[in-house]
Amino acid sequence: MNGIVTLTLNPAIDGAAEAEAIQPIHKIRTWAERYDPGGGGINVARVIKELGGSALAVYLSGGATGPILDQLVQAAGIEIRRIPIRGHTRVSHTVHERSTGLEFRFVPEGPTVAADEWQACLSALEEIECDYLVASGSLPRGVPPDFYVRVGQIATEKGARLVLDTSGEALREATRQGVYLIKPSLGELESLIGQKLPEPSDQEAAAQELIASGAAEIVALTLGRDGALFASRGKSVRMQGLKVVPKSAVGAGDSFLAGMTLGLAQGRSPDDAFVLGMAAGTAAVLTAGTELCRHADVERIYGDIVRSYDEVPG
């Protein structure tokens, strides 16, 4: 039995570097290069491992770049189930411009996945037992919009809880069936609801409407520097963002989701798991490029949050 399984349909080799200034036409010299395995579910599995947990990462990879991703995932010490595809795994790149402090992120759309390939992914999930199935990231070209609905059906048959972090039509289709937890950004929630949600009260009402409709049992709305909102049936908890000096926003949402899912899998209350997610998401912005969060930072920030509230909020 795997307590947590993550699913990444469109993973990436995440490159990161620094440059003095980004200018058109000119050759841009970079330094401090690093490469990490990336994509929503893989990032979640990396953070769970960093926090002392374990997760099985199921992902698609192929082409000339697939073996490189496989090496990076294995080097990260993550248990894996690789689904081979014919297309090339995408390579993304993040450049930190030292002169301005700005971060530039280049993210390709990735390969087209054939029907036999995404069907093989579903077959693999049917063979794996778990308590939490975290499906995170965009759907690659060729994968039908209702793919996460099928994943949810597999999870239900196993008695597993589906944790979903995606957007657009894939999110809309999945919430029509209903999932355990969704983690939209404000823009993704507004797109799902079909209206702007400028006020905190609007956001809380929208989250409660989704829960009442059966779209999700828990909504964890991430708001960047403005913090996050946790909503379950009849209950909403909002936490302000912590004041930190950010180095990179890469993987902050994935780190939040990893912390919250790990907390739930450990048997913590949803409120406490939410705090752990907040701590992990905040810790992720303290590291450069694609490093994600560090365990020591997460523990320190978690303690700061709990002390600031005298107890876990809620």
Image (cartoon, rainbow, N blue to C red):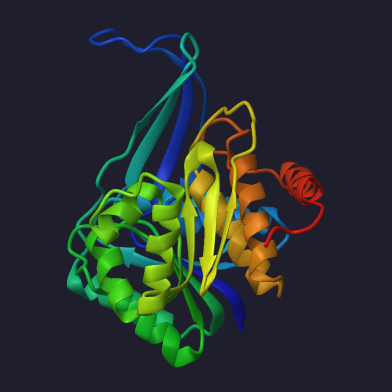
Asked if residue 73 shows in the view, the reply is no
Instruction: Look at the image and tell me in which quarter the N terminus lies.
Output: bottom right
Comparing 191 with 142, the one in front is 191
Residue 17 placement (x, y as % from top left): 48, 25
Residue 6 shows in this picture: yes
- Residue at the spot x=42%, y=80% of the render? 125
Q: Is residue 25 left or right of residue 3?
A: left
Q: Quadrant of residue 165?
A: bottom left
The front one of 154 and 90 is: 154
Residue appearing at x 38%, y 49% in the figure = 186
Decide: is 168 above or below 156. Answer: above
Assign the C terminus to one quadrant of the image: bottom right
Nearest the viewer among 53 and 224 is 224
Q: Residue 256: horizontal and vertical position, in percent?
A: 56, 52
- Number of marks in the rendered image: 0
Return the residue found at the far bottom: 157
Measuring from the top left, give residue 267's x and y in whole percent: 71, 75
Q: Position of residue 181 (x, y in %)?
A: 47, 70
The residue drawn where x is 62% and y is 50% is 278
- Using the rendered view, name the quadrant where residue 8 is placed: bottom left
Relative to 9, does residue 212 appear above or below in the rendering?
Answer: below
Residue at 82 percent of width and 48 percent of height: 307
